[in-house]
Image (cartoon, helix red, strand yellow):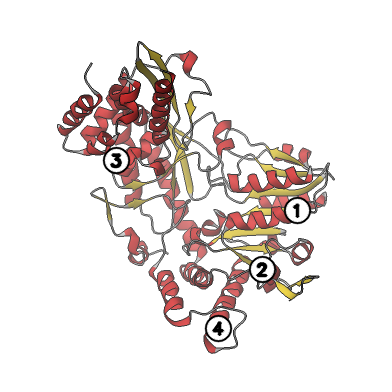
Amino acid sequence: MIDVNDIRHQFPTLHQEVNGHPLVYLDNGATTHKPQVVIDAISHYYEKLNSNIHRGVHFLSQQATDAYEASRETIRQHLNAQHLHEIIFTKGNTEAINLVANGFRQILQEGDEVLVSAMEHHSNIVPWQMACQSSSATLKVIPMDEMGVLDMDSYKNLLSDKTKVVAVNHISNALGTINPVKQMIQWAHEVGAAVLIDGAQAGPHCSIDVQDLDADFYCISGHKVYGPTGIGALYGKEEWLKKLPPYQGGGEMIATVSFDKTTYADLPHKFEAGTPNIAGGIALKTAIDWINQIGLDNIVSYEKELVDYATEELSKIEGIRFIGQAQEKAGVISFIVGDIHPYDMGMILDKLGVAVRTGHHCAQPVMDQFCIPGTVRASFAVYNTKEDVNRLVEGVIKAQTMLS
Amino acid sequence: MASIQDIQQDIIDEFDMFEEWMGKYEHIIDLGKSLPLIEEQFKTKDNLIKGCQSRVWLHAQHKDGKVIYTADSDAIMTKGIIALLVRAFSEQKAQDIVEADTDFINQIGLKEQLSPTRANGLVSMVKQMKLYALAFQSQN
């Protein structure tokens, strides 16, 4: 059971007025707020530990290194990775995808194919476009239907021995669809393709087991799981991480350096050039611990209740059209009302203290498929309440009255 | 024809009547609805100013020493602001437009609408209006 009042008390940013109204924050798909323990963990690092990691023999450096590496272990457990060195710290989900896509530039050849889905956001499209461009491989798109569900028959038909990579999100940021990634990975493996799962939205909304999924790469973003911005993690199977070339050169990622030749460090350091976001890395552990203390299962079932309630209440509004109506959904409700432009709706909701995302959610191809300029997206976190939903619904009705 | 400055003052006075944001917004929405539509032939890719959130079309022509603007947007709030900008700048001399400031949008309490971070295309639109005026001015 969730005690939402107790949870809300832990989030200082939630307790403020916006435009004269108590803040209703429903833009969690963009980023979540941070509980006090996470904020404290960042301060604690700078107040007590501040030191560079992995290189100092002195006390503070060791302490900071231990805290940072403890976070890697927490992430390993959270994703159920087999080995600690399969967890690479990144600055976020986008960097993780770029790291992998960049590595594949050297592996892909002319005639090879990379598959992405029609519901990807730009950060899981553009890095692959760039990789295909520089290797003369071809990017192909797994289509989706009008409900926002991937067409699995088409996916199966697209797979062939030419397919080298499949990159799909676990949960769509624009539509909330939960994709059947386990099945997709299995089919991709049958043709020998590697699979990257973008877990940016899945991180806060479902439990992840990379071994059970048999994912080759899986990435999460810290700031979407109640952690700091500028930190995230990439899981990669050992064999793949060994195969991929380093992403960036610099300190930390080397074993020996001379002007003739540099040998690279072992995993995971091969992919972690330079001084990382140490405070962020340490505080990401705090965020994951915080989630686990509440219990991911509790969070998932509470959020489902909220999303169901919101869907039910919103559907009473005349002219509302939900974009993305998959059976399996999490965390997100995307909609438009009549012919009201999402931007107009968002402006008025903002004045009423309700924070939602409007626009194309960095997923323009998704909007093109539905022939709309964008949507209004309400996305939920464990600290949201039914009262938040009521305020959203009132706001949408108010905006509708003003705009029509 | 009143000067740009006079028109801007009229607009400021007009908005002073509304004490709350809602009145202002409703007025903007009404203005947006009444903005004469840009002719379809001018709603071209070349005339499109891209914003992340809403799109703006702007067309300008120079006639009898004056610049005439017509514009449109797919979002009604954006269109309302456009209506104000067109009202202030259309049918004015190119040089006056080049020299005019756009602070009246701030003064009527809609500063956020013209913030570059809004990504609604309006900031680029103002810039584009001035660029047209500058181009017409240099033709003379």
Q: CA distance from mark 2 to mark 4?
A: 19 Å
Give the letter of the chain under mark 4.
A
- Specify the amino acid type for callout 2: Gly
Q: Which residue is mark 2?
A: A250
SS assignment at label 4: helix
Within-10-Å neighbours for mark 1: few <14, some 14–19, many 20+: many
- Specify the amino acid type for callout 3: Lys
Q: Which residue is mark 3?
A: B111
Q: Earlier in the sequence, mark 4 or mark 1?
A: 4
Residue B2 falls in which quadrant of the image? top left
Please tell me whether residue B25 is drawn above or below residue B62 in the rendered image: below
Foreground pick, A45 / B137: B137
Q: Which residue is mark 1?
A: A104
Whether residue A143 is visible to the viewer of this picture, yes or no, is yes
Q: CA distance from mark 2 to mark 1?
A: 20 Å
Q: CA distance from mark 2 to mark 3?
A: 45 Å
Check residue A61 in the rendering and tell me which mark sits there, or answer none. Answer: 4
Q: CA distance from mark 4 to mark 3?
A: 48 Å
Give the letter of the chain under mark 3.
B
Q: Is residue A369 left or right of residue B85?
A: right
SS assignment at label 2: loop
Q: CA distance from mark 3 to mark 1?
A: 46 Å
Please tell me whether residue A115 is drawn above or below residue B35 in the rendered image: below
> Which quarter of the figure is the N terminus of chain A placed in?
bottom left
- Specify the amino acid type for callout 1: Phe
Q: Position of residue A71 (x, y in %)?
A: 56, 74
Whether pointer 2 and pointer 1 mark residues with C-beta atoms closer than 8 Å, the reply is no
Give the letter of the chain under mark 2.
A
SS assignment at label 3: helix
